[in-house]
Image (tube, helix red, strand yellow):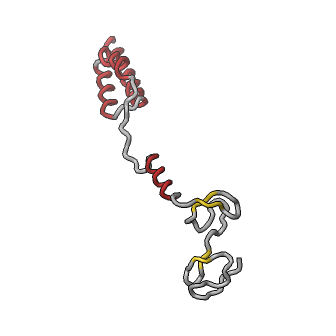
Amino acid sequence: MFHYIMLLAGLLAAVWVYKDAKQWGYTKLWIILWSIGTLFTVYLFFPLYLILGRKPQLKAKPENKDTMENITIEAEAKFSGVVIDCPMCGKQVNEEYNNCPHCGYTLKLYCEKCQYELERDWKVCPNCQTKTPEK
């Protein structure tokens, strides 16, 4: 009868160690080793696990291309250049933008025919003589 009680205690302890080791961030191999050790030698492995095993495991961080450093570099690359104020909403935008990202105002006009950049007050395109659209 004593052996059955010890087997049940070992089984319950092994299940508890398995769940606890998962929460502490152990790899599958270590979880299984701690659990099997606890199942078969509950007197030895269970106290060892309680003393040594209940510490957070440092997980190796996977290489991720979207680290904060890369995001910052990409953001700086996107916003490099001269910053101007949008004539419509007054918020700062990159001079290279065609439209204000805040209000949608068209910052740059292009000829419909030749795609030449136009000034707002021009009536015709100086490149191809096409009339500019009404603003």
> Looking at the rendering, which quadrant does residue 31 occupy?
top left
Q: Percent position (x, y) of residue 15?
A: 39, 26
User: How many numbered discs?
Assistant: 0
Looking at the image, can residue 41 be seen?
Answer: yes
Q: Percent position (x, y) of residue 98?
A: 59, 68
Which residue: 67% across, 75% down? 120
Q: Is 89 above or below relative to 26?
A: below
Front position in the image: 92 or 102? 92
Residue farthest bottom in this picture? 129
The C terminus: image quadrant: bottom right
Front position in the image: 92 or 39? 92
The N terminus: image quadrant: top left
Which residue: 63% across, 68% down? 107
Q: Percent position (x, y) of residue 115?
A: 55, 80
Q: Is 110 above or below relative to 8?
A: below
- In the rendered structure, the answer to whether residue 92 lies left or right of residue 66 reads right
Q: Is 110 above or below relative to 20?
A: below
> Looking at the rendering, which quadrant does residue 118 occupy?
bottom right
Front position in the image: 9 or 71? 71
Looking at the image, can residue 8 be seen?
Answer: no
Front position in the image: 106 or 36? 106
Q: Percent position (x, y) of residue 68?
A: 46, 46
Q: Is 131 above or below relative to 119?
A: below
Which residue: 55% across, 60% down? 82
> Looking at the rendering, which quadrant does residue 125 occupy?
bottom right
Which residue: 37% across, 35% down? 59
